[in-house]
């Protein structure tokens, strides 16, 4: 028999929009669902891409959330849940006042952009929070010379003095910042109280970049769709909702340590990715494989997330080992679901018409360049 409690359980467990029932907070309504006692979670950040998904799942699990931001970025997804969130305002650069004299069980550091920011927040919170979760990146492995990168592999701790190219320097800077931030978090909190998660490309609703949008938009529309790279080039990505949910499970279970946050569950080649993504739609598509690396490079087609041209320094970027993450509970949304949900979000009110237009016309947009690239490709190939 379906009791009212079972019915509420079912609703709360589903990923559908959770209705507000009565006057109880979500934390109170869902207290029976979580794997741990209710946690007081502080998110440094919380309002852009990853944060709202963490918040949605944590509230569903019955935890309570405080966010710490400058108050500039507005969430574009799960907006309705923010009335349940304590929103603290400050600046990681120079104003942590709002965090002083408070206690939380866990701090999730999403907004780490400088080593000094992580040092300052970890030092301030080390006696008032039990766990520190730092959101790093697989960029700590740059340059990705080898395959099967594991958590314990060497990190990039400084930019080589010989680096002159500005783009290359920026890539190094990001990896170096994340690697040193990981170390400072572990140094201040202690390894036994720190969780480091290294996401690969995150995809899904609320992404602030347009780098994945070629796939849902072009595959839904139909017509010519480019499959770049060699037949066996692997791809890796992670649905933002999967990684958000897993992060909350890690803190609930106090699973400390370092984890590569990478999907899919097993090796996927670029054609498998494109065909799998197309399963979200029933459009008529003309797939065109462009596998000549020289041509791709000459036409500035070296990166179409999650695919990356097989260059020496990027060899391992899509070959990161995710076995530890899977063992600790990371689970994966089917690719077609990720693509369909991203498509639905892209055409919802959460995304402005202006952004959609910019995506079609911006300088590096493959959509804008595709006709020209294909003409060149046919001439080059024949
Ligand atoms: N996207 C990917 O594929 C990917 C891959 C690997 C790793 N990562 C990492 O994942 C993490 C999550 O990023 P996210 O943007 O999605 O997180 P988020 O928590 O949803 O949003 C970032 C937050 O940082 C806040 N913020 C920015 N500057 C701040 C400052 N000076 N002081 C206080 N708050 C500040 C922003 O709000 P205000 O603007 O209002 O301050 C915003 O709420 C990042 O560390 C990123 O490096 C991302």
Image (cartoon, helix red, strand yellow):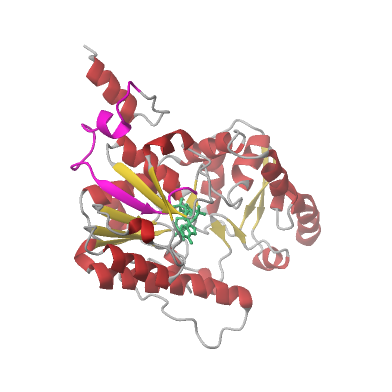
Number of numbered callouts drawn: 0
Q: Is residue 336 left or right of residue 348?
A: left
Magenta extent = 21-48
Measuring from the top left, give residue 76's x and y in whole percent: 53, 41
Q: Quadrant of the N terminus?
A: top left
Going 24% across and 45% down the picture, which residue do you hit? 39
Instruction: Name the chief secondary structure element in magenta.
Output: loop
Q: Is residue 151 visible?
A: no
Answer with the quarter of the image where residue 357 lies.
Answer: top right
Q: Nearer the viewer, residue 51 or 172?
A: 51
Going 28% across and 35% down the picture, which residue do you hit? 27
Q: Is residue 333 left or right of residue 209?
A: left
Going 39% across and 31% down the picture, which residue do you hit? 15
Q: Quadrant of the C terminus?
A: bottom right
Answer with the quarter of the image where residue 100 lies.
Answer: bottom left
Going 20% across and 41% down the picture, which residue do you hit? 35
Q: Is residue 114 left or right of residue 297?
A: left
Q: Is residue 98 visible?
A: yes
Measuring from the top left, give residue 256's x and y in whole percent: 23, 59
Query: Above or below — where is 19 with respect to 80?
Result: above
Measuring from the top left, give residue 72's x and y in whole percent: 54, 51
């Amino acid at each position: 028999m379906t009791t009212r409690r079972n019915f509420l359980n079912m609703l709360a467990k589903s990923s559908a929009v959770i209705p507000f029932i009565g006057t109880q907070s979500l934390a109170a309504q869902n207290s029976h669902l979580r794997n741990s006692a209710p946690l007081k979670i502080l998110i440094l950040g919380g309002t852009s891409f990853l944060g709202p998904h963490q918040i949605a799942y944590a509230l569903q699990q019955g935890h309570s959330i405080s966010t710490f931001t400058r108050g500039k970025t507005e969430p574009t997804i799960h907006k309705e849940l923010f009335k349940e969130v304590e929103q603290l305002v400050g600046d990681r650069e120079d104003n942590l006042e709002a965090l002083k004299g408070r206690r939380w069980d866990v701090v999730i550091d999403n907004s780490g952009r400088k080593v000094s920011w992580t040092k300052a927040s970890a030092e301030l919170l080390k006696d008032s929070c039990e766990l520190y979760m730092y959101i790093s990146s697989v960029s700590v492995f740059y340059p990705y010379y080898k395959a099967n990168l594991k958590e314990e592999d060497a990190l990039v701790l400084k930019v080589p003095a010989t680096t002159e190219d500005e783009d290359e320097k920026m890539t190094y800077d990001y990896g170096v910042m994340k690697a040193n931030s990981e170390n400072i978090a572990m140094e201040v909190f202690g390894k036994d109280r720190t969780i480091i998660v290294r996401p690969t490309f995150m995809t899904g609703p609320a992404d602030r970049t347009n780098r994945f949008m070629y796939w849902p938009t072009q595959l839904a529309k139909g017509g010519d769709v480019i499959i770049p790279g060699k037949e066996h080039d692997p791809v890796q990505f992670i649905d933002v909702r999967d990684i958000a949910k897993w992060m909350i499970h890690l803190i609930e279970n106090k699973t400390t340590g370092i984890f590569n946050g990478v999907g899919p569950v097993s090796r996927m080649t670029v054609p498998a990715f494109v065909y799998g993504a197309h399963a979200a739609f029933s459009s008529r598509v003309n797939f065109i494989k462009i596998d000549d690396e020289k041509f791709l490079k000459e036409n500035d087609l070296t990166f179409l997330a999650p695919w990356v041209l097989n260059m020496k320094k990027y060899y391992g970027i899509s070959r990161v080992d995710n076995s530890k993450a899977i063992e600790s509970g990371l689970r994966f949304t089917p690719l077609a679901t990720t693509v369909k949900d991203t498509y639905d979000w892209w055409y919802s009110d959460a995304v402005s018409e202006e952004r959609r237009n910019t995506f079609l016309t911006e300088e590096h947009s493959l959509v804008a360049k595709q006709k020209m690239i294909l003409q060149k490709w046919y001439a080059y190939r024949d």
